[in-house]
Amino acid sequence: MKADKKKVFIRSFGCQMNVRDSEIIQGILQKNGYSVCENDQNAEIIIFNTCSVRKQAEDRVWSLIGSYKGSKIIGLVGCMAQNYKDKAFLRDEDVSFVVGPQDIHKLPEILARIQPKGLLERKIWEVDNLNRPEEIYHTGFYQNPNHAYVVISEGCSNFCSYCVVPYVRGPLRHRQKEKILNEIEAAISQGITSFTLLGQNVNSYLDDGFNFTELLKEVNALKGLKKLGFFTSHPKDAGIATFKAIRDLEKLDKTLHLPLQSGSDRVLKLMNRGYNSKEYVALIENYRKIVKDGSLTTDIIVGFPTETDKEFKETCDLIKKIGFNAAYIFKYSPRPQTEAAKMVDSVERQEKEKRHKYVLDLQRKISNKLKKENK
């Protein structure tokens, strides 16, 4: 392999889990003699670490791949890779290799098969692995010298009807408590003092009877750790024990991200969220009783199939009632394999845009009001 073939640029899209995956990829490649460039100009190989949660994110990736017009060796990694598999080569012939989230440890071996002229013996796709090897989490590489994302669980088994994650990330799997603590202690020895625990459904963590709240307590007690957070929670697994941990653990952020998605009980049922609006409000009331002045953020989807004007208003009314500090607001888009993709996408694009803007403006007013009150 020529020396310049060892120069790789990684471009990451999507959630914090993908940010951590890109760090893992960089750590693995560096340990195997590859140089990871800060920009694409100096790189021969471009790795797109991708997200399939929104169609817009996928469209952007395909557009960027097309912009290289065959001038780089292109690899598609992550959720889009798992979703498209070998069909990615038909979508864009410039894609040379496709690697799913559970197969990223194979990247050095794959890149070693790239020929001197940038040709492959054949197109390569690796999307069959069910579990990641534990060692990939222990490369010691983190992009930020002060903060580290730490994955505590992988995949998801909730099967929310709009979400592709269970199909591209696989079923819920928990890392062993000792391995998580070892990773954090090793990062602390490098001078990192702030950590965020990650999982598609982080508060469902369970390792041989050892639950999420107990993990928070053990991590909080680590010497040298100064700040701790976690992302993202599911309402069905949130409760008093977690809220008390947020209140009592001195290093833990006094904040909770708890996706609502919709204020309509009918829509929540169609989404297969596992709770109704009354149950969600009860959770928030308990959180605020326990965590005084705690921050609260959420996710909202507008324009879900068959969502009526009345149901959209129910969402807006609930947003006003609860008063989130901030919210991530998304327009629904059908995702392959999901149950919602079988439904008629009945809300017109223009109406989705209108609802999206309305909720953005509404949340902005609420956020600004809360900021002024908390000054």
Image: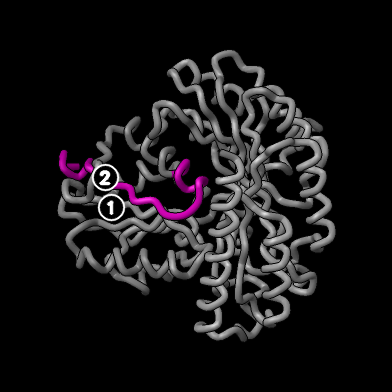
Q: Quadrant of residue 141?
A: top left
Viewer-nearest residue: 172 or 302? 302
Q: Compared to 245, does 372 lie above or below?
A: below
Residue 208 image position (x, y, % from top left) = 78, 32
Residue 169 image position (x, y, % from top left) = 58, 54
Viewer-nearest residue: 331 or 131? 331
Residue behind mark 1: 46
What residue lies at 46% left-to-right and 62% top-to-bottom? Answer: 80
Q: Name the mark on residue 8.
A: 2
Residue 280 image position (x, y, % from top left) = 79, 56
Q: Quadrant of residue 209?
A: top right
Q: Secondary structure at mark 1?
A: strand
Please state the extent of the stretch shown in magenta in the rendering: 1-21
- Sequence order check, earlier mark of 1 and 2: 2
Residue 252 lies within the magenta run = no
Q: Secondary structure at mark 2?
A: strand
Residue 130 visible in the shown view: yes
- Answer few, some or many: residues within 10 Å of disc 2's Cα (few below 14, many 20 plus, some between 14 and 19): many
Task: Look at the numbered discs 1 and 2 and tell me whether their residues touch, using CB distance below 8 Å.
Answer: yes
Residue 318 image position (x, y, % from top left) = 72, 63
What residue lies at 68% left-to-right and 61% top-to-bottom? Answer: 319
